[in-house]
């Protein structure tokens, strides 16, 4: 049995997925400062390797619990199935590399745009000749809500809503939600339009925890599952095994 462990430590959450070959058998959030990973290895003694993507630190705390298996820490120095063109390669986020790898797994050797909507919104291009081109970074929904609350005297702290958004609003909460969510929606639409002019036959992947608020609002896009990044990590680990 070939079981592997993939870990994604983001700015707000740490998550793992256990694969049996190419199938996920368990996924969950965990606390890196607890013994969650130690207990996980006890439940899955056949895990024989793993990979970590982290933008939120706590790598060493995880590795301390995973001494019994070889772990790859994803960085720009990791062998990748595409070429990095980013000038500051050492500063590219590991999460962005994993997302581009996930796009490669879904649509190899094609032009793809990955829009990840989390703490920040990131835009990454994978070209048909397998080059990764970095793109803009902007604040995510919750970061926008938090900024307006913390930098004003009277605006409340809000969260995204699934309600229909309007440009005529009846109260402050509706005003904030429409401003943030419609702002994000139209930002993404405009970026997609600009990228589509530059890259032919562009696949557009919408990933990240807040992509659920944009479903049915963006045409011709692939709304990635919650396992999208994990599949990218699995692909990178497999790619390194055969190099």
Image: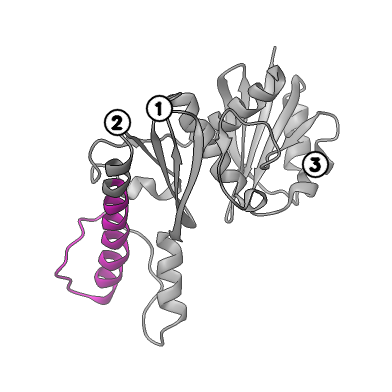
Is residue 168 in the magenta section? Answer: yes
CA distance separating discs 2 and 3: 41 Å
CA separation in Å, label 1 and label 2: 8 Å
230 or 75, nearer to the observer: 75
Residue at figure coordinates x 29%, y 49% from the top left: 194
Q: Is residue 117 left or right of residue 1?
A: left
- Whether residue 218 is visible: yes
Q: Identify residue for label 2.
A: 201
Q: Earlier in the sequence, mark 2 or mark 3?
A: 3
Q: Quadrant of residue 78?
A: top right
Residue lying at 27% horizontally and 50% vertically, measured from the top left: 189
Span colored in magenta: 163-192
Whether 189 is among the magenta residues is yes
Is 18 situated above or below 35?
A: above
Residue 227 shows in the view:
no
Q: Give the SS element for disc 3.
A: helix
Residue 71 x %, y % = 77, 33
Task: List the residue tagged with mark 1.
Answer: 110
Q: Position of residue 180 (x, y in %)?
A: 32, 65
Q: Nearer the viewer, residue 228 or 162?
A: 228
Q: The residue tagged with tag 1: helix, strand or loop?
A: loop
Circles 1, 2 touching at the beta carbon (< 8 Å):
yes
- Residue under label 3: 63
The reply to whether dot 2 and dot 3 touch (C-beta < 8 Å) is no
């Amino acid at each position: 049995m070939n079981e592997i462990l993939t870990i994604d430590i983001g700015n707000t959450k740490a998550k793992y997925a256990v694969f049996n070959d190419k199938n996920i058998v368990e996924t969950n959030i965990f606390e890196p400062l607890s013994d969650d990973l130690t207990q996980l290895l006890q439940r899955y003694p056949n895990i024989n390797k793993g990979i970590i993507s982290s933008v939120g630190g706590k790598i060493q705390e995880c590795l301390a619990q995973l001494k019994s298996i070889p772990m790859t820490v994803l960085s720009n120095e990791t062998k990748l199935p595409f070429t990095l063109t980013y000038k500051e390669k050492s500063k590219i986020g590991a999460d962005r590399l994993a997302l581009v790898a996930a796009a490669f797994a879904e649509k190899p050797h094609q032009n793809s745009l990955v829009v990840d909507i989390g703490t920040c919104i990131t835009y990454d291009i994978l070209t048909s000749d397998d080059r990764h081109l970095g793109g803009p970074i902007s604040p995510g929904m919750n970061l926008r809500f938090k900024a307006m609350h913390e930098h004003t005297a009277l605006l409340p702290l809000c969260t995204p809503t699934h309600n229909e958004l309007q440009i005529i609003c009846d109260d402050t909460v509706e005003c904030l939600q429409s401003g943030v969510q419609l702002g994000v929606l139209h930002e993404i639409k405009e970026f997609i339009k600009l990228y589509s002019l530059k890259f032919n036959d562009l696949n557009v992947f919408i990933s990240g925890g807040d992509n659920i608020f944009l479903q049915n609002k963006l045409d011709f896009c692939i709304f990635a599952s919650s396992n999208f990044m994990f599949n990218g990590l699995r692909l990178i680990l497999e790619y390194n095994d055969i190099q």
